[in-house]
Amino acid sequence: MDEILKIGADKLRQKISSGEISSVDAVKACYERISQTEPKVKAFLKLNEEQALIHAQKSDEKIKSGAKLGALEGVPIGIKDNIMIKGESMTSASKYLKNYISPYDATVIEKLKDAGAVFIGRTNMDEFAMGGSTETSAYQKTANPWDITKIPGGSSGGSAAAVSAGMVPFALGSDTGGSIRQPAGFTGIVGYKPTYGLISRYGVCALASSFDQIGSFSKNVKDTALLVSVIAGKDYRDPVCQPAEAADYTHNLDNPNTFKGLKIGVPKELGNYNVDEEISVSFKNDLKKLTEQGAEIVEISAPSYKYVPALYKVIMCAEVSANIATFDGVRYGYSSPNGAGLNDEYSKTRAESLGYEVKKRIIFGTYVLGAKNYYRCYHQAQRVRTLLINELNAAFDKCDFIFSPATLQMPVKFGGELPEECDIFLIAANLGGFPGITVPSSFSPKGMPMGVHFMGKRFSDAKLFQAAAAFEKISCFDASKYPL
Ligand code: GLN
């Protein structure tokens, strides 16, 4: 594999800016690696080679001329196919948006363009980000680069696989219920979901608006912190986006004393679930290492963890049914030519263009919002959600971070099913709006990567990066190892 891609985004950025490596060479290295691995992995729905090379050339000229450079000048990145880039297609891996062209840039894209990043291609995902395996994509299945008979996780499986296989140094994804952190865990990379409201969702195809966040995949924590420094910050076009100015998230990531005196909370409820043997062994070892670094392991408890799968399903599906109501075949997207009258046209449009998983969620979401079920299901779920948030906030009085395995199970083969508890500790972060990051921790005896998850208080993202970066230094994972 090309050495250019092994150094990670931050070092690559430095070398491009100093002229040591040209952006054109970096971009070519990505496409070279893609041409080798993509036939097996199928991470991308679309590649922009021609445009990317033109952009890279412009960056190189800028660098040579001594002009002011963007924070990511000439650095390649992959973008999940549910984020709008003006004038380009955005399918959300659905047939419904097959011919859709984005009329404007998402805020994160605007910021990346200002920073000079080069877009390599659009990554595959579960249809409208509904799924945990990338198998519900209407177009193709993405494979886990560490074992191509297995799923990469999802819904951002394309971004995870692309970064994991070294096709791009980092990538954007979206995380509504673990969709960045679960595939990052399955593919041995860093996956981050910000505090709800830290990064704008303007221009992102909505799944469930009270959970959705844009986040990132990278090979190391520093690269994620660098990317977040570029894309975070206030945006009046996303009403939940907090008014904080953009900040630098990259400092204090090399402090050898980060864990000294830090309280790491481990949920008592972890003991209630079946955890795969290799994950359990690795996690115990991780706890031991944290203690050796001076951290204090404390037991925390949030009894409402047991409701996470149900809460998530009810609220997420309710929001799905509301968001997807705009997909009516009238305003944009697919429109069935077979409808006889308005109602028939609505239903045929959806019947012909949406996949099974999407239809199932619309139906269930409509059910829980129905007059008879609203209080019994949706309203009740929101109340229990508050209970869980209160319990987790109380837990944060006792610890700095809540720590768990990234996933409780290893990735399954295509067509296999993951138990619903697999990512419950990740989904708790979405329910509460807390930031979370998964970091690779070790390899299983069969050579599959495993990871851990740190969840912090709201807006503790900078501290979260510090803990994750410190963990990365003591983890048994060899990040210089690439699959395929
Ligand atoms: N597995 C979750 C779901 O299917 C993940 C969704 C997401 O985060 N986009 O809803």
Image: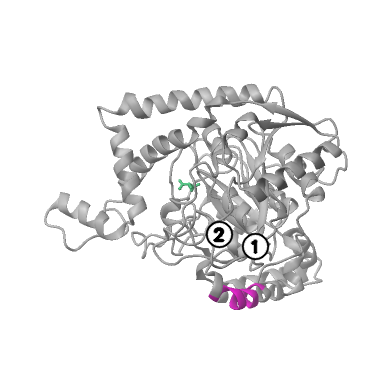
Q: Residue furthest right?
A: 256
The amino acid type, in three-letter code, at marker 1 is Ser
Say few, some or many: other residues with alpha carbon within 10 Å of mark 2 (under 14 / 14 to 19 / 20 or more).
Answer: many
Comes first in the chain, label 1 or label 2: 2
Q: Which residue is mark 1?
A: 164
Q: What segment is highlighted magenta in the picture?
A: 30-39
Would you say residue 310 is visible in this rendering? yes
Q: Is residue 134 above or below residue 432?
A: below
Q: Main secondary structure of the magenta part?
A: helix
Foreground residue, 188 or 162? Answer: 188
Q: Is mark 1 within 8 Å of ligand 1?
A: no
Task: Give the side of residue 33 with respect to residue 329, left or right.
Answer: right
Asked if the magenta segment contains residue 37, the reply would be: yes
Task: Give the side of residue 291 with respect to residue 317, left or right.
Answer: right
Distance CA(mark 1)–CA(mark 2) = 10 Å
Would you say residue 118 is visible in this rendering? no
Point out the frontmost of discs 1 and 2. Answer: 2
* Secondary structure category for the residue under label 1: helix
Q: Marks 2 and 1: in contact by CB < 8 Å?
A: yes
Q: Is residue 294 above or below residue 394?
A: below
The amino acid type, in three-letter code, at marker 2 is Pro
Say few, some or many: other residues with alpha carbon within 10 Å of mark 1 (under 14 / 14 to 19 / 20 or more).
Answer: many
Q: Which residue is mark 2?
A: 152
Task: Give the side of residue 293 with respect to residue 216, left or right.
Answer: right
